[in-house]
Every structure is written in C-alpha cells, then in structure tokens.
Image (cartoon, helix red, strand yellow):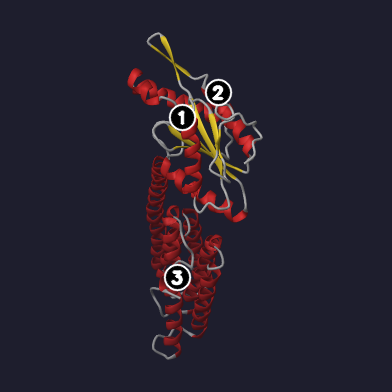
Amino acid sequence: MTLNNILYSGYKFGEDEDFLKFKFKMLNSIFIIVAFFSTLFGLLSDLGINDIGPIHSKVNYAYSILTIILIFFLRSSKKNYTLTAHALLIISLITFTSALLFVPQDEFRIIWFYLLILVAYKINSKTSGILYTLAAIVIVLTAHFFAELQLSQVSINSSVLGLIIGSLLSYIYTNKITQYENSLKEQNSTLSVLASTDYLTGVMNRRMFNDISERYFQTAQKDDLSLTLLLLDLDHFKKINDTYGHQVGDKLLIQFVETTKNILTKSDIFARVGGEEFAILLSQMDRKDAYDLAEKIRKEVENISIRYKGQNVFVRTSIGITQNSTTDSSFDDVFSRSDMALYQAKKEGRNRTCYASISNDNIYCPDSTMHTEALNFTI
C-alpha cells in the first residue's frame, strides 16, 4: 500500500473533486500524525522520559487506536468523510480534556484546544469550527470551576480570549477559501460547458460527441442494445452564405437547431459535428421509428425561413441513417455507414432521407426515384 493510496483512502477522484481530494489527504495526514505522536507520548511517559500520568497515557494509547480505526473506516466509502472528521474531532476533544484535567504539570496544555479549533475549520466546516470553539470554551471554564487546574484566572481568561480570537481568524480564512472554492467551481463549470458546446448553436460540439458516442457504442455492443445515428447536412449551405452572408447563415443554423431540439427528447444526443453538419444519436429505437423521426425533422426544417432584403431565405436538409451492428469494431464504423447514406441522399437530389443497411452495402432512400422500397424495407 503506497503513501498516496493511504492519503487518498484508495479512492480515485474526478477533475471536479480536487478540493475533496485535498481534504482527504489532509484528514489522513492528521490521522497518521496523531497515531504516531499519541503512541510516542504514551511510550515516553511509560519510560519516565515525559511524564503525563498513567490516566492520560492510557488515553493517548486509546486515541492512537481509534485514529487507526478511523483510517480504515474512511476507506469504506467516500460518503464517510464528514462522519469520520467529526469522530476525529470528538475523540480529540476528549483527549485534550484529559490532558487539561490529568496533566497539571503541563502549563501549556490548553494550546491543544487551539489546534482542535484550527483542524475543525480546515477539515470540516465553518459551523463545525464554531461548535468546537464553544465546546472548548465550555470545557475550559467548567474544568476551572470544578477542578484544580493549577492555572491562574489570568491564564484562563487569556486562554478563552485566545480561543475566541483564533476561531474568528480561522472563520474569516475559511470563509474566504470557501468563496474561492465556489468561484473556482463556477469557472471550471463554465469552461467545461464552453469546451463541450458549439459556440453558435449551444448544442454539443464534435469533440464531446466523439467521446459520448464511443461510450454509448461500447455499452450498446456489450449489452446487445440498438444504437441509431442520424447525420444531417444543410443543403447548399455554402451557397446561402456566399449569396446572403454569414449572418443569415448563422440565423438559419440557430433556427435549424431550435426546430430539431423541439422534436427530440432529452435523452437524445444532438451535436454539431461540422460547419453545417449535425448528428443525432438515438438509443433503443427501431429503424422505422428512426426513419419517421428523421422525416419529421426534415419536413419541419422546410418551414424555416429568414427574411432578407424583401425575400425569404429557406433551408433544406439531407439525412443519412444507420444502426450499430455486431460486426462493428468502433463507433467510426457506424458513423461511416451513416455518412455514406447522407452522401447518397445528397446525390439523389437532396432534401431526403436515406438508410444504410447494416448487413450489406445497400443504401435505401424510400422517397427517391431510384429506390422505391416501402418503409418496412428488408435490411
């Protein structure tokens, strides 16, 4: 078991879990330090080198054992972090109280409560830091009232004031760190969206589509599920840009995306994979339903128009469809077949839908003059 494995409790952390990863590392580091030095203090006391008394010596051994148990408890689930952190703070509070009561020869033993408060803020939360500050103050004042701590009233007053000041400074620092953390998460989220989204239309971009489609493909092949790919290309779009300008072209692209999104469901994957080329990935849909969906999109797109200098500018789309096959080795095979079907649709006059067979090299275009197969054509 490597040191990193111990510090991270054996977990893998995602890119969005950097702060949690840091907290795990800090908590486990504290566990190791506490286990080592608690055992060392107990041994030194037993050897008569640093006498802390028999009671507190045993408390230190127990502190060390419980800390080691917490190390293994934290490894059982990431969700145990908060509970483990509280457990550490509670047993630390008990141990430091033991030092306060049973080691009167240590004039500086209240300093351990300062450490407790600092750790509470660091590994848990602002609320936790405030609670353990109040607990430490109550313990110090109660112990001073009922027991002989061999500490002057001035020492007690200074200690309590120091705990309050230390807690306030830790609160300010932790609050600022939390603000930075939230700001960083928002920035990372924004950058992630920008990196995976097409800047103009707001749909998924090619890079993200490639990643997702390959994962979908691997799952579909493993679990014998159907996966359908639609490739859509806006007909003569370059001519539209050259004739009317890119501003008109951009508006048509945006309207095309909005029209298509209104037809699709939330589970459908929709992406812009080229200048005027889009892809739709569908799960568990048979070829007839996929064809009907493609035709619905194609016909709805026919209603799109942009008014430019007194005339309407229209756009049309050609669509190529295919599904995954047991012989496909990667999603590229699916994409290639769908691309061939799209090419055939454009070759046969555009503004039509063609389907690439998964069992042979045939491409079917039910609405074309070249192929007149019915919608339930044999694949």
Hey, what amino acid is under mark 3? Asn
- Which residue occupies the foreground of this view, 70 or 133? 70
Residue 154, relative to residue 45: is it above or below?
A: above
- Binning the other alpha carbons within 10 Å of mark 3 as few (below 14), some (14 to 19) or many (20 upward) gives few
Query: What number is the disc on residue 240?
Result: none
Can the viewer see residue 202? no
Tell me: 370 left or right of 149.
Answer: right
Quadrant of image for the N terminus: bottom left
Hey, what amino acid is under mark 1? Lys
Residue at disc 3, secondary structure: helix
> Of all residues shown, which one is farthest toward the right?
376
- Binning the other alpha carbons within 10 Å of mark 2 as few (below 14), some (14 to 19) or many (20 upward) gives some
Mark 1–mark 2 contact, CB under 8 Å? Answer: no
> Of all residues shown, which one is farthest toward the bottom?
47
Residue beneath label 2, please?
300
Find residue 253 and report its horizontal and vertical position in percent.
43, 27
Residue beneath label 3, please?
5
Mark 2–mark 3 contact, CB under 8 Å? Answer: no
Instruction: Please state which of the two labelled residues, at mark 1 or mark 2, is closer to the viewer.
Output: 1
Find residue 190 and report its horizontal and vertical position in percent.
41, 41
Distance from Cα at disc 2 to Cα at disc 3: 56 Å
Instruction: Please state which of the two labelled residues, at mark 1 or mark 3, is closer to the viewer.
Output: 1
Q: What residue do we see at 46% from left, 89% from top?
A: 46
Residue at disc 1, secondary structure: helix
The quadrant in which residue 265 appears is: top right
Query: What number is the disc on residue 347?
Result: 1
Instruction: Please state which of the two labelled residues, at mark 2 or mark 3, is closer to the viewer.
Output: 2
Residue 307, relative to residue 361: is it above or below?
A: above
Mark 1 or mark 2: name the one nearer the start of the chain: 2
Tell me: 50 left or right of 98.
Answer: left
Distance from Cα at disc 1 to Cα at disc 2: 22 Å
